[in-house]
Amino acid sequence: MERLPKIGLPILFAGIILIILIAKSTITIDSGEAGVLYQTFGGGVVVDEPPLGEGFHFVAPWNKVYVYEVRQQSLDERMQVLSSNGLEIEVDASVWFQPDYEDLGALHKEKGEAYIQRVLQPAVRSAARAVVGRYNPEQLYASKREAIQKEIFEETQLLLKDQYVQINEVLVRDVSLPSTIKEAIERKLRQEQESLEYEYRLTKAEQEAERQRIDAEGKARANQILAASLTDKVLEEKGIQATLELARSPNAKVVVIGGENGMPLILGNN
């Protein structure tokens, strides 16, 4: 019995060491993450094998695992850039990105865990400066928001080629101009709108005047044709026809034949 404490202490100590080794030799990678294995005695970062996926893994206790989020992430950037005429423009944008899964080892080895600050942010800012510098403030304010968004996305993709980072989308939330420039642009747009409205009304008035002129010319021409066709004989025939129609009427009338210009006269009715 006296020997049990002497034997039990080493066993207890060995058990504790074993538990520590097991704890140090396992890692659980959560959903949306992946692990990069660093082999202390085997050449450092493993770049020629896929990263460790989600789940439970055994790793030698002298090795390390660096965990990265590999699902889509968002980076919000508010940047001060210059327009084509040198005015300062504030661009508020969001970038959707994720690291290249298969190249996660290379990303860790070459860029490190701070790859967002070292690679992604400088690329987005450089692309924004290059793109906004192609436009003047009026274009940025009025109609070029979608074009700027697309061009920043394409420019960022070019800058991040072979950098192990995938860009999914760039969203430009706001383009802010200096207040004086914004007011001047809005004033100019209002004046242009008023000018267009005046031109429209003027055009409508000219069209209406032209319509009335054509209508008047048509009526005048019709009257000329009618006047030329109404000879004395025609008028007499029309008068005779009218007299016959009156004679058939049930109302009592006095009709004098041979009135002025030979036309019948209607003296009255009852």
Image (cartoon, rainbow, N blue to C red):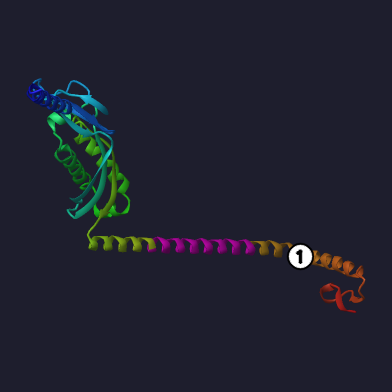
Picture coordinates of residue 246, whole percent (x, y): 88, 70
What secondary structure prevails in the magenta region?
helix
Amino acid type of the residue tagged 1 in the rendering: Thr
Quarter holding residue 48:
top left
Picture coordinates of residue 39, whole percent (x, y): 12, 23
Magenta highlight on residue 270: no
Tell me: residue 124, above or below residue 254.
above
Picture coordinates of residue 119, whole percent (x, y): 16, 37
Give the labeled residue for mark 1: 231
Picture coordinates of residue 227, whole percent (x, y): 70, 65
Quick check: 120 left or right of 262? left
Quick check: 30 left or right of 45? right
Quarter holding residue 55:
top left
Q: Quadrant of the C terminus?
A: bottom right
Q: Residue at x 82, y 65 (%)?
A: 238
Q: Residue at x 90, y 75 (%)?
A: 255
Res. 212 in view: yes
> How dense is the environment of label 1, judged by Cα within 10 Å: few (below 14), some, or many (20 and up)?
few
Q: What is the span of residues highlighted in magenta in the rendered image?
A: 194-220
Q: Secondary structure at mark 1?
A: loop
Closest to the observer: 265 or 187? Answer: 187
Quick check: 203 left or right of 5? right
Q: Residue at x 57, y 64 (%)?
A: 212
Quarter holding residue 72:
top left
Q: Quadrant of the N terminus?
A: top left
